[in-house]
Image: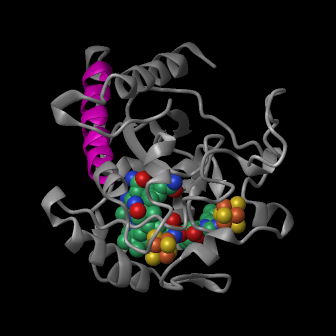
Amino acid sequence: MTVIQQWISTLIKDYVSEYSGRNGCKSEWQEPLAGFVNASDERFATLKESVSATHALPGDLLPDARTVIVYFIPFVERIATSNVQGDTCSYEWAAAYIETNKLIFDLNTYLSGQLGQKGYASCLIPATHNFDEVKLISDWSHRHIAHLAGLGTFGLNNMRITEKGCCGRIGSLITSAVVEPTQASGQENCLYKHEGLCQKCISRCPEQALTIEGFDRHRCYSAKCLENARTYSQLGVADACGKCLVNVPCSWRNPARGPVKKPPNAIAGSE
Ligand code: B12
Ligand code: SF4
Ligand code: SF4
């Protein structure tokens, strides 16, 4: 890791580790992962085809853009475990959705301030709700930015599966600071894409919005996310679900790395 990569990664880790408990925030997170992509990387142009013709380039949002910082903030396991049972998303998952969106906004504001003290400009991007409500597509896809930075790989459940799994949220920030880009490992992390196995995410979807043939984003949104938003309206806009992320092999780790080694005193068959 270079000095500036290390500096930014540490700012992100320290900020996230100290966030829980502030202003009544009850959610907790594991240590985040960060990646970097050169703002003039030619692959940004491909997002106008793979995401939408109106997908922004970094320079559209920050004229002096040099780097896009992207990070993945994993939830602690209890938040995902709470969302395993039933078809309605758990209270903890809904609250973590809202609190992590706020965390991403606050973290980006903090990073922008730290970069500003060194003379660099930044452009803040929200975690979500920056999408077209008819097409359900955003002009800034954090997942695709993570793809360009080599942070995780796309799973069958559409999530970025990182070395710390997929149960968490992604944020990004454009800056005029020059930071060396990070690279993909070259390995598929999803067991289905890696070796044609698993498909557990598909069987967990209560609405059959996620199938082996594809993903029906409108069904996911109207049948589940908006229903959950109504259930938890007292929390804010919790248009979330996440059943296809929890209790699956990629929830917490990169499953393509092989089975988890049991500690020496583990009881056989206790999993
Ligand atoms: C609009 C939106 C939605 C819509 C539509 C989702 C969709 N898949 O299109 C709705 C409301 C339905 C939704 C639902 C959910 N969302 Co949402 N959503 C977004 C939002 C705002 C924009 C996504 C977008 O524009 N997608 C555009 C389409 C075209 O791209 P895509 O969805 O990523 O699909 C692509 C991949 O599948 C890709 N792909 C597959 N394999 C490969 C391989 C390669 C090599 C490449 C290049 C691409 C690729 O191809 C598709 C087209 O390009 C982002 C935040 C943001 N601004 O980025 C969050 C976001 C994607 N959502 C997120 C989450 C967690 C969810 C939910 C679990 C809800 C929840 N929080 O409980 C569900 C999951 C549904 C699912 N299984 O996909 C997270 C994902 C985190 C992660 N680990 O990856 C994001 C990034 C929010 C965040 N800040 O963390 N979401
Ligand atoms: S549950 Fe299995 S098939 Fe689905 S995304 Fe995770 S590893 Fe891939
Ligand atoms: S978020 Fe819920 S409704 Fe949407 S695809 Fe996943 S399990 Fe299905």
> Residue at coordinates 57% horizontally, 46% vertically from top-left?
41
Write down the region rendered in magenta. 97-115
Left or right, 91 with respect to 217, comes to left
Q: Nearer the viewer, residue 188 or 207?
A: 207
Q: Assess whether residue 113 is covered by the magenta stretch.
A: yes
Left or right, 125 with respect to 260, comes to left
The image quadrant where one finds ligand 2 is bottom right
Measured from the top left, where is residue 126 in percent x and y? 28, 50
Residue 13 appears anywhere in the view: yes
Measured from the top left, where is residue 146 in percent x and y? 54, 48
Whether residue 67 is situated above or below residue 195 in the rendered picture: above
> Residue at coordinates 27% horizontally, 52% vertically from top-left?
98
Whether residue 87 is situated above or below residue 64 in the rendered picture: below
> Residue at coordinates 60% horizontally, 52% vertically from top-left?
251
Whether residue 232 is situated above or below residue 14 in the rendered picture: below
Q: Assess whether residue 206 is covered by the magenta stretch.
A: no
Measured from the top left, where is residue 156 in percent x and y? 65, 69
Color scheme of the displayed model: one colour
Residue 99 falls in which quadrant of the image? top left
Residue 57 appears anywhere in the view: no
Left or right, 131 with respect to 177, comes to left
Whether residue 149 is situated above or below residue 200 in the rendered picture: above
Measured from the top left, where is residue 12 in percent x and y? 41, 26
